[in-house]
């Protein structure tokens, strides 16, 4: 209790506090509103956090609440990605992110944590303080701690920052509430924790604990992901920037402001701990004012930084996509270009991945940055980096499209090496008289369409043309596959005749799609679409599994020695492909699996293909070069690969009996293949004359309608039964 002799000092204290409150009211500022952006994704992010951390996050009656919880939900409300939220003991929450049981956790960003986590842009600041029992509150600063036992949450920021001299005095706590309870139960003299959460927990659980120091360790708060999880980090950064611009962050912050704002100590606490010399109190008061002023400065700088981050790409400092679209739309709507803009351009650094592989990731970053600096040319107007070495910009009418490409594709001077950027460019000529609802988005879409056409046809640049637009029928077909997957697929088998053994003892697996509205579709109709969509590995695995299943069943009753399956070069590059194949052929007795791949596929990435085929060959899985003669390779080149067979293209086989040149090509190919230890299969044989001619030339295996058409498994079983 305060004695009567201290009454005059108390009155002076009250006077200074009232004066301080007026100063604080002047200092505090309210962040500005921003306009919402547009972003959508089906991506999902699993957030975790602490169960006892009000007002930031806590669990009550099987429901979770808090500022961080609402902020994460705002990402989902604005359509950035789906959000899953699960709270746990703090150390378990950190471990969940590191073991990939969760994707992100809000935490204080530190250099020590940066060894295991990557951090998003900061979005808040917190401070710590000392907390002691009300009847033993004697330590008012961290520097004044001597031999007191200190309660610290395992894995918390206080553990990382506590001076080494005090670490021997640590009493470990499981969470923020446990830290305060240890003090209340006299198992520790001090607890070091975040001010806001500790004060809420003290009030909520009626703990006999008070704050005994001013706030210290004012540090930024950010979302942390497992080290190297760049995809999730980019998603969170984009979403965070977007909700700041849209005003979503401000809405959440305003809703929680009354509980987030740090509160001054109560009258009783101040009178209890500052009834000493008036000079000491004034010094502490000035210190508090200084902290608040510094905090205001940091907040203003932080708000400015957030606004810049929300509109600019951090790597190149150019506009990001949303800001670029908004800015250029304003220019076009207001006719602010004075008619000087002529070109809308998108350009991609095609060899960026190769630079990363050949040199380093840092070199590829420098390449992107140097290319961005090149766009500072006065003829280039609005400029943006859309990510992964893809740039968009507008250009004045003083340059032709050819001149633009020549300028941006010249060598770049790097710090260690000069690199020629391989550029692919799509160009759209701007028509200021064309009325569009969102002109920039439409110009960007057209330019990207031209760029896609350029890259798929291995060109350098093209101006957009309506003929580049994708076929709507193909898009619907791809959508149907995405929905149904392989449920309407059927694997047919076409028997193959062995000339040497004079019997049919092998077959090729051929895929068909029984489309519900378009009927039977051949692979040439849908396989290219699936390949472009990156879903071909899933189809290939289904075909291999089904082919091996058929082979096992046929081998039980018939002399089937081999079954062939078509694969692509991308299949060979797929991680896990070899392991999948080796696991699938287990139990495949007396039947050999053979992969047919085009010669173009082998040339695409010959090094990787050679390694994969060598591994498979050692396990008895052979390789056949399909459609041989239609590419640009030679048998001498293909002999570098573990190839057991070449397959003559039906183009030459069909003309064998009528075209002397085709006969010479087939004859020389068979002779050279045999000299190199390879067998030869001819496909597309439809008449007896062609069969006899191929036999005479020494062809090893023959396939075509003369023997059998591609048929269902049931029909093939009947076919083998009849022949036997």
Image (cartoon, rainbow, N blue to C red):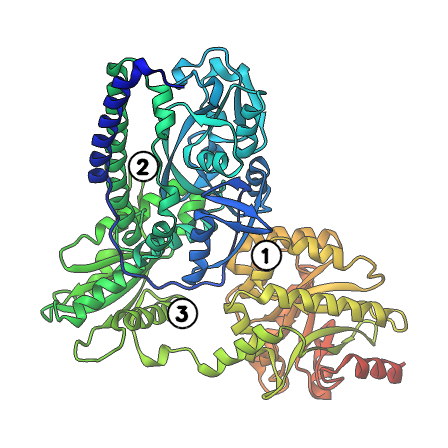
Nearer-N-terminus badge (2/1): 2
- Mark 3: give few (<14), some (14-19) or many (20+) Cα within 10 Å: few
Nearer-N-terminus badge (3/1): 3
Residue 422 seen in the current view:
no
Image quadrant holding the C terminus, namely bottom right
Left or right: 298, with 645 as reference point: left
Residue 485 seen in the current view:
yes
135 to 484, vertically: above or below: above
Q: Disc 3 versus disc 2: distance between alpha carbons? A: 33 Å
Nearer-N-terminus badge (3/2): 2
- Which residue lies under the disc numbered 1? 574
Q: Are marks 3 and 2 in contact (CB under 8 Å)?
A: no
Q: Secondary structure at mark 3?
A: loop
Taking the spot 32% from the left edge, 43% from the top edge, the residue there is: 366
Q: Nearer the viewer, mark 2 or mark 1?
A: 1
572 to 533, vertically: above or below: above
Taking the spot 15% from the left edge, 68% from the top edge, the residue there is: 341
- Which residue lies under the disc numbered 3? 457
Taking the spot 32% from the left edge, 49% from the top edge, the residue there is: 368
Taking the spot 17% from the left edge, 72% from the top edge, the residue there is: 333
For the residue pair 696 and 691, the one nearer the viewer reads as 691
Check the image and name the residue furthest to the left: 338
For the residue pair 489 and 61, the one nearer the viewer reads as 61
Q: Secondary structure at mark 2?
A: loop
Q: Disc 3 versus disc 1: distance between alpha carbons? A: 23 Å
Q: Position of residue 423 (x, y in %)?
A: 32, 58
On residue 442, the disc is none
- Which residue lies under the disc numbered 2? 416
């Amino acid at each position: 209790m305060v004695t009567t002799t201290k009454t005059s000092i108390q009155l002076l204290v009250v006077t200074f506090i009232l004066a301080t409150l007026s100063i604080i009211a002047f200092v505090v500022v309210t962040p500005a509103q921003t306009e919402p952006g547009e972003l959508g994704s089906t991506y999902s992010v699993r957030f975790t956090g602490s169960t006892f951390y009000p007002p930031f996050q806590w669990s009550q009656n099987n429901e979770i609440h808090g500022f961080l919880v609402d902020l994460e939900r705002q990402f989902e409300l604005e359509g950035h990605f789906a959000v899953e939220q699960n709270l746990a003991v703090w150390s378990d929450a950190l471990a969940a992110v590191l073991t990939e049981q969760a994707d992100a956790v809000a935490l204080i960003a530190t250099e020590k944590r940066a060894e295991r986590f990557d951090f998003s842009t900061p979005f808040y600041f917190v401070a710590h303080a000392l907390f002691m029992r009300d009847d033993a509150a004697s330590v008012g600063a961290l520097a004044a701690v001597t031999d007191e036992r200190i309660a610290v949450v395992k894995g918390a920021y206080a553990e990382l920052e506590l001076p080494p001299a005090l670490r021997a005095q640590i009493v470990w706590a499981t969470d923020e509430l446990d830290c305060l309870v240890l003090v209340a139960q006299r198992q520790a003299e001090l607890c070091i924790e975040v001010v806001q959460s500790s004060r809420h927990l003290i009030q909520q659980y009626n703990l006999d604990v008070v704050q005994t120091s001013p706030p210290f360790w004012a540090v930024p708060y950010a979302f942390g992901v497992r080290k190297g999880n760049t995809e999730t980090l980019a998603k969170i950064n984009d979403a965070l920037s977007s909700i700041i611009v849209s005003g979503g962050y401000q809405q959440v912050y305003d809703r929680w402001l009354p509980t987030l704002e740090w509160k001054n100590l109560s009258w009783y606490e101040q009178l209890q701990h500052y009834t000493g010399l008036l000079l000491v109190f004034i010094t502490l008061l000035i210190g508090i004012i200084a902290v608040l002023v510094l905090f205001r400065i940091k907040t203003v700088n932080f708000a400015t930084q957030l606004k810049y981050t929300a509109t600019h790409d951090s790597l190149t400092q150019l506009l990001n996509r949303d800001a670029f679209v908004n800015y250029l739309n304003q220019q076009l709507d207001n006719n602010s270009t004075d008619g000087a803009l002529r070109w809308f351009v998108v350009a991609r650094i095609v060899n960026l991945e190769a630079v990363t592989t050949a040199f380093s990731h840092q070199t590829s970053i420098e390449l992107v940055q140097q290319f961005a600096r090149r766009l500072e040319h006065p003829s280039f107007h609005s400029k943006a980096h859309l990510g992964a070495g893809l740039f968009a910009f507008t250009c004045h009418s003083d340059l032709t499209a050819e001149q633009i490409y020549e300028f941006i594709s010249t060598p770049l001077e790097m710090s260690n090496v000069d690199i020629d950027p391989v550029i692919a460019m799509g160009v759209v000529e701007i028509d200021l008289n064309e009325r569009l609802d969102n002109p920039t988005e439409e110009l960007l879409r057209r330019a990207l369409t031209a760029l896609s056409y350029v890259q798929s046809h291995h060109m350098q640049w093209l101006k957009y043309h309506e003929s580049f637009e994708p076929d709507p029928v193909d898009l619907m077909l791809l959508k149907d596959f995405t929905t149904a997957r392989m449920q309407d697929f059927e694997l047919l088998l076409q028997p193959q005749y062995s000339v040497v053994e004079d019997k049919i003892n092998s077959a090729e697996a051929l895929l068909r799609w029984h489309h519900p509205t378009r009927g039977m579709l051949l692979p040439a109709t849908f396989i290219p679409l699936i390949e472009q969509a990156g879903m071909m590995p899933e189809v290939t695995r289904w075909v291999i599994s089904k082919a091996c299943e058929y082979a096992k069943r046929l081998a039980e009753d018939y002399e089937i020695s081999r079954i062939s399956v078509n694969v692509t070069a991308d299949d060979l590059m797929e991680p896990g492909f070899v392991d999948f194949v080796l696991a699938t052929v287990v139990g495949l007795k007396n039947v050999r699996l053979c992969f047919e791949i085009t010669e173009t596929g082998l040339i695409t990435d010959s090094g990787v293909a050679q390694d994969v085929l060598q591994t498979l060959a050692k396990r008895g899985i052979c390789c056949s070069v399909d459609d041989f003669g239609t590419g640009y390779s030679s048998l001498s080149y293909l002999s570098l690969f573990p190839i057991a067979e070449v397959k003559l293209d039906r183009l030459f086989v069909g003309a064998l009996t009528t075209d002397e040149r085709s006969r010479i090509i087939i004859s020389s190919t068979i002779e050279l293949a045999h000299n190199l230890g390879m067998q030869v299969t001819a496909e597309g044989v439809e008449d007896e004359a062609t069969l006899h001619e191929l036999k005479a030339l020494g062809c090893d295996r023959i396939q075509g309608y003369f023997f059998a058409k591609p048929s269902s498994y049931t029909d093939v079983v009947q076919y083998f039964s009849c022949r036997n």
